[in-house]
């Protein structure tokens, strides 16, 4: 069994912790583009775990807007306001104490920088990738702008691998075809009493 | 729910109202092919599967050359393997596309060299360990992603400096003790 040649990957996203508040001792996930697949790398610094998603197997990518940016804004806004108020007070009060001003300035920068970065990167989201056998979260795709950029890059590759593109109308039609028999609705509009199907409304 | 599929912008989820964008690809509607069960041997003398002697062989394994029936055939990127070769390929990392984990020895060596410096006394044990790991695993497979040997080099330099520091300290203490005697 000869080993396959080394695959060259192109970075799609930087590594990001799987949990929001995890800084250390937590695996960090990043996304890489291979010749015929996406590679999700979970790295702890001492070992790496790989998950491959072949373009031919990717069924859907979902992006859901999240409130993480708002939460961080609220968390950071309080110290930012306090530090800026302290800085302004120390600057405006008559006996200027340089040391106090510098301390307030450093504190302001410490809290203002992540506050600004959080807003510059844009809206946050949660991204999932679906194949026939799994639904996998992609933690490194956590900003809408970044996710759209990555989607733009991989969309054409997935379409090329699967031999066609689906329009919104085509998806809707197929979904309707799918849903009609599985919802247990007979052509006459009466609910079929199938114990293996979830209850569904009659359209 | 239909309004959220393959739309250029977010659309509210009809169930919960959360802004949602779903990109759907043809694979979602593709029928899942069921695997072959293997055809039974009808004629005497026909090639049989190595694992199922009562079933007809359809192709040889690309790894070991054993004859396989349709049930034992595991196709992977245009090649055909038997389950045993597939497992060996994964555990020993011989099939790159199946490899799902690697140990980063360079990261371990660097961590062994750097972190114990917080409590310096530990470096008497960890510096030789870091040096050993860096030399022992210098040629071991690194990350699947491109990675230089800079961590190994840094680990070797830092651990050598630590060892040199300890040797200097011991020599200094020994000579000082000798002059006092």
Image (cartoon, rainbow, N blue to C red):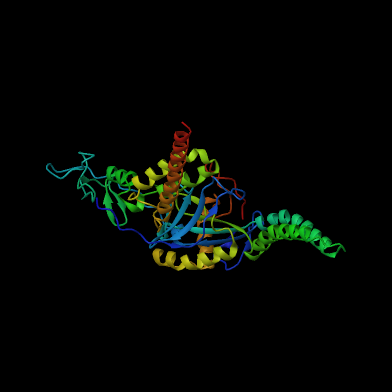
B71 above or below A68? above
Residue B38 position within the rendered picture, expressed as x and y whole percent measured from the top left:
26, 45
Left or right: residue B148 versus residue A78 is: left
Image vertical order of residue A48 relative to residue A32, above or below = above
Position in image of residue A157 (x %, y %):
43, 66
Viewer-nearest residue: B17 or A6:
A6
Out of B89 and A120, give the one closest to the viewer: A120
B113 to the left or right of A144: left
User: Which one is in front, B61 or A164?
Assistant: B61
Give the residue furthest to the top: B181
State the count of labels. Answer: 0
Q: Residue at x 52, y 62 (%)?
A: B23
> Is residue B121 at all visible to an observer of this figure?
yes
Query: In the displayed image of the protein, which residue is found farthest to the left?
Result: B45
Q: Is residue B157 left or right of residue B139?
A: right
In the depicted structure, whether residue A139 falls above or below residue B71:
below
Residue B103 at least partly seen: no
Q: Quadrant of the C terminus of chain A?
A: bottom right
Position of A3 with respect to A144 (left or right) is left
In the rendered image, residue B53, in percent from the top left (x then y), is placed at 20, 39
The percent position of residue A160, horizontal first and vertical second, equals 40, 67
**Where on the picture, by quarter, is residue A145?**
bottom right
């Amino acid at each position: 069994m000869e080993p396959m040649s080394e695959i060259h990957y192109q970075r799609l996203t930087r590594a990001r912790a799987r949990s929001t508040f995890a800084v250390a001792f937590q695996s960090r996930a990043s996304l890489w583009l291979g010749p015929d697949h996406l590679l999700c790398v979970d790295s702890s610094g001492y070992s790496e775990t790989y998950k491959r998603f072949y373009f031919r197997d990717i069924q859907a990518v979902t992006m859901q807007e999240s409130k993480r940016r708002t939460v961080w804004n609220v968390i950071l806004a309080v110290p930012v306001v306090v530090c800026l108020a302290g800085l302004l007070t120390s600057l405006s009060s008559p006996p200027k104490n340089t040391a106090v001003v510098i301390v307030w300035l450093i504190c302001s920068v410490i809290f203002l920088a992540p506050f600004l970065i959080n807003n510059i990167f844009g809206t946050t989201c949660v991204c999932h990738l679906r194949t026939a056998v799994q639904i996998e979260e992609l933690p490194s795709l956590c900003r809408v702008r970044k996710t759209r950029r990555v989607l733009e890059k991989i969309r054409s590759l997935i379409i090329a691998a699967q031999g066609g593109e689906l329009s919104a109308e085509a998806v809707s039609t197929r979904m309707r075809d799918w849903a009609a028999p599985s919802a247990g609705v007979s052509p006459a509009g009466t609910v079929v009493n199938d114990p293996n199907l979830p209850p569904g409304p009659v359209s | 729910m239909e309004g959220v599929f393959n739309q250029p912008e977010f659309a509210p989820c009809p169930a919960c109202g959360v802004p949602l964008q779903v990109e759907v690809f043809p694979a979602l509607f593709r029928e899942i092919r069921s695997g072959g069960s293997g055809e039974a041997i009808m004629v005497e003398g026909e090639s049989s599967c190595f694992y199922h002697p009562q079933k007809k062989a359809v192709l040889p394994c690309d790894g070991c050359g054993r004859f396989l029936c349709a049930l034992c055939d595991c196709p992977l990127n245009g090649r055909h393997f038997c389950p045993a070769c597939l497992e060996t390929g994964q555990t020993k990392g011989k099939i790159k596309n199946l490899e799902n984990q690697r140990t980063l020895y360079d990261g371990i060596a660097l961590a062994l060299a750097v972190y114990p410096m917080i409590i310096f006394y530990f470096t008497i044990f960890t510096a030789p360990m870091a040096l050993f790991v860096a030399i022992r695993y210098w040629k071991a497979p690194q990350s699947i992603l491109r990675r230089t040997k800079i961590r190994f080099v840094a680990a070797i330099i830092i651990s050598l400096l630590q060892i040199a520091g300890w040797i200097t300290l011991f020599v200094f203490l020994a000579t000082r003790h000798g002059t006092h005697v």
